Amino acid sequence: MQDAAPDAGTPDTDVSQPWDKDNQAWWDWYVSLADNDAEITEFEAAPPLPDVPLPSDEAVIAELAEPYPLSEADVAFFQENGFIKLKGVFSPGAVLKLRAELVRLLEEEFGADIDGGVQDRFLSLEMVWPDNPLLRAYVLSPRVAKICADLLRVPAVRLYHDNVLSKEPGCGRTPWHFDDHHFPLDTHDVVTAWAPAQAIPLAMGPLAFAHPIDVWKLVDAVAFEKSGTNYDRGVAETFARHDVAVDETPFEIGEVSFHHNLNFHTAARNRTDRSRVVLANTYYADGARIVDAPTMVSGDWQKFMPGVGPGDVAASPLNPVCWPVTAPAGGPVGRPRDE
Ligand SMILES: O=C(O)CCC(=O)C(=O)O
Ligand SMILES: [Fe+2]
């Protein structure tokens, strides 16, 4: 939860102004806060994409509506550590299809060849699902949303937003942070499903999680600065000093991680020759409200919740309940409810 009255601080720590540029500008700013070593000169070959036929849209929709077998031990692990990595959430075909669609959308938006060599940038697209029926199946997936509700131990979750992320070859680290700092939601029942659209070897910069969940308390006193790399370095040094455990492991095809908004995470540079494309969708407990004073760290949040203001219940038509499924049998999966 963010402070109701943000600390005015010095100019460099004062984030009380709303973000006034677009989402891509937000990411360009955000990755500039990461502490990086020297530029990469040699790139590793990324593993090949799976050699499987592309499933039909109907097959993907059906797969993503089936429940995933989550155990009580999985839920307990998530509650203790604030993250969990689950294998086989998507089939290889569903991953390949996701990548093809995300690459098409990124190339359309940025006019770039996504896998065409060193580009250095962190590209992002948001709010793709309302106009894209295939992406909607992944973003409003009952399988994914039920995992989120079960991990949070809440009866129902809504979508906060979708987030297409492409960390291009050569792009620098993702700075250490927790998402509580970003989401203007007045609840701690928030989880992001981070779904890679290819395998992620260590050299590609898998999302890496500090644990257990309460290590955020160790770095609560590190002041966030809106320029420079002091915050990222301050968190890294504090974690190192306290021997905080970090899970930095590869993702296999179809593996998805889920992180709580209090979990501290980072990601290394992409040292491979392929863009690290991910679909990261955030869900929160139904009934949550917007905080009284969102900050610039929340970026473009009003785009995700049109008509919803500070203090309001966060339930615009663009924040459908994704679990439990409310659409009539045979109807579109997870279509936004009229409310
Ligand atoms: O993809 C990344 O490197 C960062 C993503 C992230 O921080 C998130 O999804 O919460
Ligand atoms: Fe994050």
Image: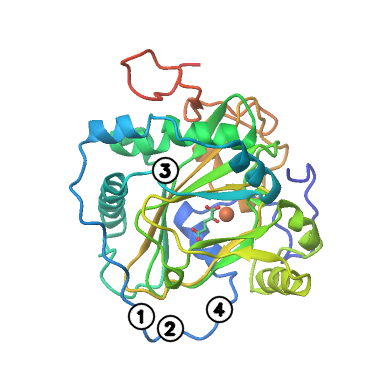
Q: Give the distance between the C-alpha atoms of the residues marked 4 and 3, in whole angstroms.
A: 32 Å
Along the line of sight, the residue nearer the viewer: 121 or 235: 235
Secondary structure of residue under mark 4: loop
Residue for badge 1: 43
Could you tell me the amino acid type at mark 1? Phe
Instruction: Name the residue at 25% across, 65% down.
Output: 113
Amino acid found under the numbered disc labelled 4: Asn
Q: Secondary structure at mark 2?
A: loop
- The Cα–Cα distance between marks 2 and 4, rounded to whole angstroms, is 10 Å
For marks 1 and 2, give the CA distance. Answer: 7 Å
| Distance from Cα at disc 3 to Cα at disc 2 | 33 Å
Residue 251, picture quadrant: bottom left
What SS does tag 3 mark?
Answer: loop
> How far from the left and from the top, in percent, is residue 164?
41, 51
Q: Position of residue 134 (x, y in %)?
A: 29, 37
Q: Disc 4 marks which residue? A: 36
| Disc 4 residue lies near ligand 1 with CB under 8 A | no
Quadrant containing ligand 2: bottom right
Q: Is residue 106 visible?
A: yes
Q: Mark 1 or 2, which is nearer the eye?
A: 1
Q: Which amino acid does the dot numbered 3 rest on? A: Val
Q: Residue at x 67, y 30 (%)?
A: 289
**How far is the residue under mark 1 from the one under mark 4?**
16 Å
Q: Which residue is mark 3?
A: 89
Q: Residue at x 17, y 47 (%)?
A: 53
In the figure, 253 relative to 70: above or below? below
Does residue 305 appear anywhere in the picture? no
Label 2: which residue?
A: 40
| Relative vertical location of residue 119 with respect to residue 52 in this rendering, above or below | below
Seen in the picture, residue 47 relative to 180 is either above or below; the reply is: below
